[in-house]
Amino acid sequence: MRLLFITSNRLGDAVLSTSVLRHYVETYPGIRVTVACGPVAAPIFQAVPNLERIIEMPKQKRGGHWWKLWKSVVFNWWDIIVDLRGSATAYVLPGWKRVVLSGNDDSVHRVDQLGQVIGVTPPPYPKVWINKKNRERADLILPARDKQLLIVGPTSNWVGKTWHPERFVETISQLTEKGAVFDDAHVLLVGAPNEREMAENILQSLPEDRRSEIFGSESLLTVMACLERADLYLGNDSGLMHMAAASGCPTLGLFGPSRDEHYRPYSRWGRAVRTDWSFDKIMENRESRFSKENLMETLPVVKVVEAATELVTSYRLQEKNHD
């Protein structure tokens, strides 16, 4: 069997879409997979089981990227074609079964909607496959496994939903102080290559022997392997937050000018904490839709520290009872 899986340009949406891909990979063992997606998202699919090909689809004028995709796959027979970008492509390719997402349903989380499209309720959790090489690389980057690991994603692709750096500094300080849930933990800061400067003050607030950083210096699958080892991921609403949730580690996403009911971390141990202001109130009170203001002002440090402490405490209690 062969599957053509067409998914998002954006990293976060692509991670969420792996819920659908996971369903087909696990339902049809041995199914051969071709993934078509944007260049930013492409690396997260490199270890998908029975992967035949990744087709990168950088946007082109007048829909040229769709024409290029069609030409590259039209001479194959596809047992299943999944198009989560709602194009007409699935209908003009030779195949048997077609699954097309026609638009967003704002009454449910995006992963729940994807589950409805494939007729699976509840849907599988998103999953990003990694390999032994990625885990070995993570072991070289991170401290010994007996050391607690707090991973922080203090950046995002939009200033509006980027929590204040000084609040990250204070939150990390409170979570890692003596007697706190991450007393003497190692802290790994992660982000895109162009985001390191945004995190400079946070990096400088941490002792050199208790911090590491990955800002585009490692593959996304190596970052994923690091997330697997995290005792907590704390960060803004971003693709990295969704990767953290997909890794299974306790994940706390910070929300303000984005809807947590649609994009909260989707996993057993995924939680969202949002600003005191609702999404609608934030949007009604911003200077303009084109402004570059920070819209996370009404999320206080105490609220984040309490949410992180509660999540980690619950997770550890469950793990202890399980043992």
Image (spheres, helix red, strand yellow):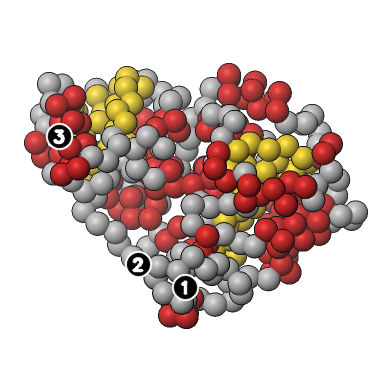
Residue 263 found in image quarter: bottom left
Q: Quadrant of the C terminus?
A: top right
The residue beneath circle 2 is 107
Q: Amino acid at mark 1?
A: Phe
Do we see residue 256 in this rendering? no
Query: Disc 2, disc 3: CB below 8 Å?
Result: no
Q: Position of residue 218 (x, y in %)?
A: 58, 29
Q: Is residue 54 left or right of residue 141?
A: left
Q: Looking at the picture, how far across and down is residue 56, in whole percent?
A: 31, 31
Q: Is residue 162 above or below residue 42?
A: below
Residue to which mark 3 is pinned: 67
Residue at mark 1: 279
**Mark 1 or mark 2, which is nearer the start of the sequence?**
2
- Amino acid type of the residue that numbered disc 2 sits on in the rendered structure: Ser
Callouts 2 and 1 close, C-beta under 8 Å: no
State the residue in front, 309 or 206.
206
Question: Counting other residues with Cα less than 10 Å from the Cα at mark 2, is it few (<14), some (14-19), or many (20 or more)?
Answer: few
